[in-house]
């Protein structure tokens, strides 16, 4: 049940080798944390798996189909439909209420506004956001805003959720709450989760941790056996 795989991924920037032959797989309801020192290749790996960065070597497969050679239009359509993204901060549109931020990816897929907002609202209770549907991002706490961002990433019911330092701007208590919800709701939805984090406590909420060093995987820890 492999959802997403990277085989022999290589990425170079001039004379810098950001990835030198990385193999990685994630399955349904599987969560993977990528850790490692600054400059080790974590972001490049996440972006390559997400079809944002093109590898110079190797392959990226989504449910067995190669996506790294797709044309830019097909690749960006695939990202919108099959991937969800959560970033550190600043990802919500400030002028839109929370529910419309969550509905936006559905509207981009052509769903009528009313239907998209109704669908979006279904994510609020599971994420502990009941009653906050009409708040604008500026009227939300950091943790609440991040939970809205998680709802938005999940709204299209993606195959994979990518999270780049999703708790990077939060205090410890809020961070624990957000990572618990991110891992549990993603799993319940049946998606895979790939995350970059500097925080070992956050990574420990994932099923597996990949340590990256100098563009290679230096260690692979399995916390739970599926
Ligand atoms: P990390 O996320 O672990 O901090 P990155 O994946 O951002 O590491 O970077 C890995 C290496 O590739 C670093 O040496 C970085 O400077 C380099 N790099 C990343 N992106 C680019 C880019 N767009 N252009 C040039 N060098 C890059
Ligand atoms: P992160 O903190 O997530 O590792 P960075 O701040 O290192 O992100 O990088 C932000 C963006 O700049 C990324 O898209 C990365 O690929 C790019 N980047 C990183 N290093 C370089 C570099 N040396 N030259 C150009 N772009 C880079």
Image (cartoon, rainbow, N blue to C red):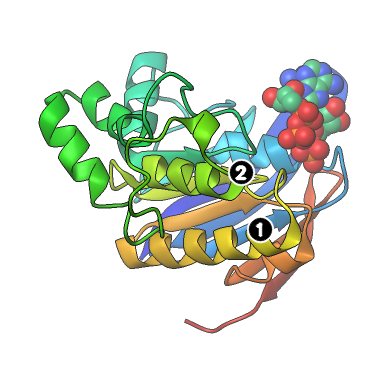
Q: Left or right of 16: which side holds 165?
A: left
Residue drawn 32% across and 24% down? 77
- Quickly name the residue at label 2: 142
Q: Left or right of 128: which side holds 144?
A: right
Q: Check disc 2: other Cα within 10 Å, few if <14, some if 14-19, many if 20+.
A: some
User: Relative to 117, does residue 108 appear above or below in the rendering?
Assistant: above
Location of residue 80 in the rendering, given as x and y in whole percent from the top left corner: 35, 30
Question: Which residue occupies the foreground of this view, 151 or 14?
Answer: 151
User: Relative to 211, does residue 137 appear above or below in the rendering?
Assistant: above
Residue drawn 69% across and 64% down? 173
* Image-quadrant location for residue 163: top right
Location of residue 188 in the rendering, given as x and y in whole percent from the top left corner: 34, 67
Secondary element at tag 2: helix
- Quickly name the residue at label 1: 175
Counting the numbered discs, the total is 2
Location of residue 143 in the rendering, given as x and y in whole percent from the top left corner: 58, 50
Residue drawn 54% across and 67% down? 180
Q: Is residue 29 visible?
A: no
Q: Is residue 138 visible?
A: yes
* Image-quadrant location for residue 128: bottom left
Are the residues tagged 2 and 1 within 8 Å (C-beta)? no
């Amino acid at each position: 049940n492999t959802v997403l795989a990277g085989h022999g991924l290589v990425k170079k920037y001039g004379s810098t080798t950001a990835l030198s032959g990385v193999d990685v797989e994630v399955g349904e309801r599987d969560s993977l944390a990528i850790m490692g020192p600054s400059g080790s290749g974590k972001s490049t790996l996440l972006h390559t798996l997400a079809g944002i960065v093109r590898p110079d070597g190797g392959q990226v497969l989504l449910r067995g189909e190669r996506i790294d050679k797709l044309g830019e239009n097909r690749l960006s359509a695939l990202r919108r439909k099959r991937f969800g993204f959560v970033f550190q901060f600043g990802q919500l549109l400030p002028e839109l209420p929370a529910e419309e931020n969550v509905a936006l990816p559905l509207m981009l897929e052509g769903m009528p506004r009313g239907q998209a907002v109704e669908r979006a609202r279904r994510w609020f209770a599971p994420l502990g956001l009941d009653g906050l549907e009409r708040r604008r991002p500026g009227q939300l706490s950091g943790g609440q805003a991040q939970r809205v961002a998680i709802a938005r990433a999940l709204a299209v019911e993606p195959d994979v959720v990518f999270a780049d330092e999703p708790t990077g701007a939060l205090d410890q208590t809020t961070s624990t709450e957000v990572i618990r919800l991110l891992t549990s709701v993603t799993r319940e939805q049946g998606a895979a989760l790939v995350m970059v984090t500097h925080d070992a406590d956050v990574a420990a909420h994932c099923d597996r941790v990949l340590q990256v060093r100098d563009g290679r995987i230096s260690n692979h820890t399995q916390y739970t056996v599926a």
